[in-house]
Amino acid sequence: MKKILIPILATISLAACKKTNTTYVTDCSSGTKSFATDVKPLMISACSGGASCHGSGSQKGPGELINYTQISMDKVGIRSDVVSGRMPYGMTLTTAEKNTIVCWIDNGALNN
């Protein structure tokens, strides 16, 4: 009986410790996002400004994320990290801020 009970209890314990994975749903109904007006200021403040993780001279991850070329070249990674909540490091973006970045990327990541 113990040989059967121990694996069952171990499985239940491991399942209970798993982090709940919530699905992020993008809402792009608020209109087209502009790189210059919406995305760049957000990226500067969250990713390369106060945290200085991806500021001028950065060697972290994709490096600097301070201009259109740098940001658009890593848009797939940025999208993934923003949706998962892995980035920006040390802070949490609001749903509206996540939507700004994700919707801009999903709508072609235009330099507008």
Image (cartoon, grey):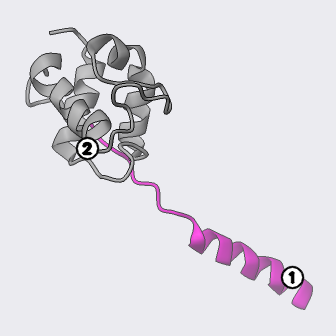
Q: Is residue 36 above or below residue 94?
A: above
Quadrant housing the N terminus: bottom right
SS class of the residue under badge 2?
loop
Q: Please name whichever residue, 110 or 107, is drawn nearer the observer in this view of the structure.
A: 110
Q: Is residue 93 left or right of residue 23?
A: left
> Dot 2 corresponds to which residue?
50
Three-letter residue code for mark 2: Gly
> Dot 1 corresponds to which residue?
4
Q: Which residues are magenta?
A: 1-27
Q: Is residue 37 left or right of residue 23?
A: left
Residue that appears at 86% across and 82% down: 4
The 10 Å Cα crowd at callout 2, few under 14, some 14 to 19, many 20 or more, is: few
110 part of magenta stretch = no
Three-letter residue code for mark 1: Ile
Q: Please name whichever residue, 92 or 51, is drawn nearer the observer in this view of the structure.
A: 51
7 part of magenta stretch = yes
Q: Is residue 65 left or right of residue 37?
A: right
